[in-house]
Image (cartoon, helix red, strand yellow):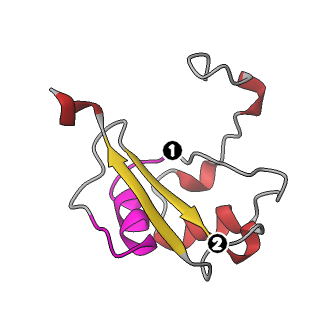
Amino acid sequence: MEEFGIDKHQLIIVPELYEAHTSDFYNVVRSLDDEYKTVAIFSHNPGITDFVNDLTEVNTDNMPTSAVFAVQIDTDQWQQFREAGKKFLFFDYPKLHD
């Protein structure tokens, strides 16, 4: 967060995302406050891989450590995240550049 100039007090720890299933991710996103226009979700496998594979037609066999899978959604309300149209933006991770 320091690297991006983001106040560390903006970090929200959500215990439900530890060993989460796809439905847990959707539940957490659905509960987000609409004041947040951009969010980053951090979690572990296999749940995070299952979740990103449910978002768009772009899939991955594995979300490596520190991977970023970015999507843009067609809604201003997190409550509508699951049903909203999603556009895949990019998938990147550090070892891809080794």
- The residue that mark 1 highlights is 42
Please tell me which of labels 2 and 1 falls first in the chain: 1
- Relative to the observer, which residue lies in front, 21 or 35? 35
- The residue that mark 2 highlights is 74
Query: Tag 1's secondary structure?
Result: loop
Magenta residues (range): 42-59
Where is residue 78? Give x, y as percent. 73, 67
- Image position of 93 (left or right of 35): left
- Image position of 56 (left or right of 61): right
Quarter holding the N terminus? top right
Where is residue 92? Give x, y as percent. 32, 43
User: Up-down: is 68 above or below 73?
Assistant: above
What kind of residue is marked 2?
A: Asp
- Image position of 59 (left or right of 4): left
Quarter-wise, where is residue 80 in the image?
A: bottom right
Residue 66: say if magenta: no
